[in-house]
Image: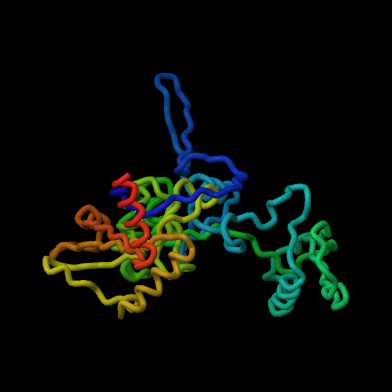
């Protein structure tokens, strides 16, 4: 009988970017009078209540395109607001420009940054909107000053930030101007993020397996797993993190699994988007100290694929396999 295909890694048809290093590790080779010296680049971020922010453009670019860490604060994925064409001012919608005008009028002038030149998309009138859209028609913009400029930053979620600090050793996180040691950062993240030890253990587990791990909130899960990165492949798995404790494997309460109906709906939602749900159980020993990152070594991870079983589809597969066997 033919083997059942449990999942499929689907490649994107149009790829406009090239693959880079899987991790943002940049080494520099130097030398003194006696020996060669190898140094590596550090990145700096600021701890916020909902993640870690990176503000330097070059660091933002390296972190995103070398491993696809984080997302732009003003963009859906890559931090590219105002960087699409370096020879032109950044573009913005008329709605966003009006919102910036309202924010500028509500803030004292001495607290505002200097205005910057931008291209604002002209608002179409009713007659223009009613006409059929022409694929060759280009949007029209006018040049003006943005009264309330906002710099885009790279937002790392907590697991990404700690992996860069603890797993790769290339990120220094600050809070209130003070550099946080790895132990301090771990304890702060455990305070800010519920179930952080389990979530980080799963994130670290899949990153070390070569997957690019992104947030899965759009599909009701914890993470999405990509081969190589979002520009090259569609997400293959939607990962749900479950925690179990002790020798009896007692599961912690999770409102997403109050019934089989809710789990079935989540599986169907992801199946319609060509993704396979992967339950990732993090097994905590009976006595484990979660106050230090060393506890990650003690946690065991068990993966379980969940797929919808349709009688008509699966029955047809069995009949086809049986037919091939007899012929």
- Quadrant in which residue 295 is drawn: bottom left
**Total label count?**
0
| Residue at image point 40% right, 21% down | 35
Taking the view exactly as shown, the residue that stands out farthest to the front is: 327
Foreground: 133 or 219?
133
Above or below 63: residue 25:
above
- Quadrant in which residue 131 is drawn: bottom right
| Residue at image point 50% right, 54% down | 234
Residue 107, x across and y down, in percent: 69, 77
Q: Colour mode?
A: rainbow
Above or below 287: residue 161:
above
Image quadrant in which the C terminus is located: top left
Residue 184, x across and y down, in percent: 33, 60
- Is residue 187 shown left or right of residue 9? left
Q: Is residue 47 at least partly visible in the picture?
A: no
| Residue at image point 40% right, 74% down | 265
| Residue at image point 58% right, 51% down | 56
Residue 315, x across and y down, in percent: 34, 62
Foreground: 220 or 201?
220
Taking the view exactly as shown, the residue that stands out farthest to the top is: 34
- Is residue 97 shown left or right of residue 63? right
């Amino acid at each position: 009988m033919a083997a059942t295909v449990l999942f499929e890694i689907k490649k994107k048809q149009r790829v406009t970017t090239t693959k880079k290093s899987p991790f943002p590790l940049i080494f520099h080779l130097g030398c003194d009078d006696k020996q060669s010296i190898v140094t590596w680049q550090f990145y700096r971020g600021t701890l916020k209540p909902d993640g870690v922010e990176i503000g330097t453009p070059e660091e933002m670019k390296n972190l995103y395109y070398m491993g696809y860490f984080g997302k732009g604060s003003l963009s859906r994925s890559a931090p590219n607001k105002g960087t699409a064409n370096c020879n032109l001012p950044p573009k913005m919608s008329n709605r966003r420009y009006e919102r910036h005008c309202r924010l500028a009028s509500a803030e004292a002038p001495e607290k505002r940054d200097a205005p910057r030149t931008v291209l604002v998309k002209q608002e179409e009138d009713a007659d223009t909107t009613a006409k059929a859209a022409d694929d060759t028609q280009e949007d029209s913009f006018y040049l003006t000053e943005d009264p309330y400029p906002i710099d885009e930053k790279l937002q790392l979620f907590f697991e990404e930030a700690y992996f860069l600090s603890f797993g790769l050793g290339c990120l220094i996180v600050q809070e209130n101007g003070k550099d946080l040691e790895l132990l301090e950062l771990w304890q702060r993240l455990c305070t800010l993020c519920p179930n952080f030890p389990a979530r980080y253990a799963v994130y670290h587990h899949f990153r070390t397996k070569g997957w690019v791990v992104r947030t899965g909130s759009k599909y009701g899960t914890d993470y999405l797993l990509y081969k190589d990165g979002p520009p090259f492949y569609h997400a293959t798995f939607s990962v749900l993190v479950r925690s179990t404790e002790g020798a009896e494997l007692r599961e912690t309460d999770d409102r997403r699994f109050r019934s089989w109906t809710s789990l079935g709906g989540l599986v169907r939602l992801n199946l319609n988007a060509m993704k396979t749900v992967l339950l990732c159980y993090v097994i905590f020993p009976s006595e484990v100290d979660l106050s230090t990152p060393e506890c990650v070594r003690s946690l065991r991870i068990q993966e379980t694929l969940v797929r919808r079983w349709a009688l008509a589809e699966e029955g047809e597969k069995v009949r086809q396999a049986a037919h091939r066997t007899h012929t």
